[in-house]
Image: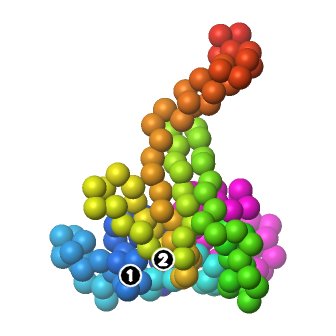
């Protein structure tokens, strides 16, 4: 059994000590569980299984297709915005193209996430940091009312107010 979504999901929820890549002892104690009762922690790019014949019949995917642990929506947004590849060059034996790429995602709310080589901690608790991959961390901060921020920026640049047009 492995942790669905990889260790990054556990880290984002405060359940993983990102310095040691182990379950957070205080969280386990508060929950009344031991590390032995929990699944193995894996990185988001780890293969954790394969599509079974039964799953292939239901999904239409080829049997034997690899199943990857995956990542949280925030980490995946950085991958989708090409921010991850620029910072992952080190893992491929190449010089890094860009250091500390940031990605802003906006919707009802939003976040700014910056990819780092080492964890970064905010003593005031205004930002958070979680594992993106075994050697990459995401330092992030929340943006409230992300959609409103986009609307204001569009109006300031002279774009039509689409919300009022409805």
In the picture shown, does residue 75 fall above or below 146?
below
- Is residue 56 within the magenta segment? yes
| Earlier sequence position, callout 1 versus callout 2 | 1
Mark 1, secondary structure of its residue: loop
Q: Are marks 1 and 2 in contact (CB under 8 Å)?
A: no
Q: Which residue is pictured at 37% across the width and 75% down the height?
A: 16
The residue to which callout 1 is attached is 19
Establish if 28 lies above or below 91. above
Q: Is residue 17 left or right of residue 140?
A: left
| Magenta stretch in the rendered image | 54-83
**Does residue 14 belong to the magenta stretch?**
no
Relative to 142, does residue 107 appear above or below in the rendering? Answer: above
Q: How many marks?
A: 2
Secondary element at image label 2 = loop
Q: Which mark is residue 118?
A: 2
Q: Nearer the viewer, residue 160 or 47?
A: 160
């Amino acid at each position: 059994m492995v942790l669905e979504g990889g260790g990054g999901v556990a880290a984002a929820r405060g359940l993983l000590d990102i310095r040691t890549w182990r379950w957070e002892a205080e969280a386990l104690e508060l929950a009344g569980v031991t590390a032995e009762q929990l699944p193995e922690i894996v990185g988001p790019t780890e293969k954790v299984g394969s599509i079974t014949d039964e799953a292939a019949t239901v999904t239409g995917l080829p049997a034997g297709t690899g199943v990857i642990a995956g990542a949280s929506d925030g980490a995946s947004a950085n991958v989708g915005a090409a921010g991850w590849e620029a910072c992952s060059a080190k893992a491929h034996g190449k010089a890094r193209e860009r250091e500390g790429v940031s990605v802003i995602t906006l919707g009802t709310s939003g976040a700014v996430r910056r990819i780092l080589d080492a964890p970064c901690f905010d003593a005031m608790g205004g930002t958070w940091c979680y594992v993106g991959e075994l050697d990459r961390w995401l330092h992030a901060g929340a943006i409230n009312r992300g959609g409103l921020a986009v609307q204001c920026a569009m109006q300031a640049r002279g774009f039509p107010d689409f919300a009022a047009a409805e």
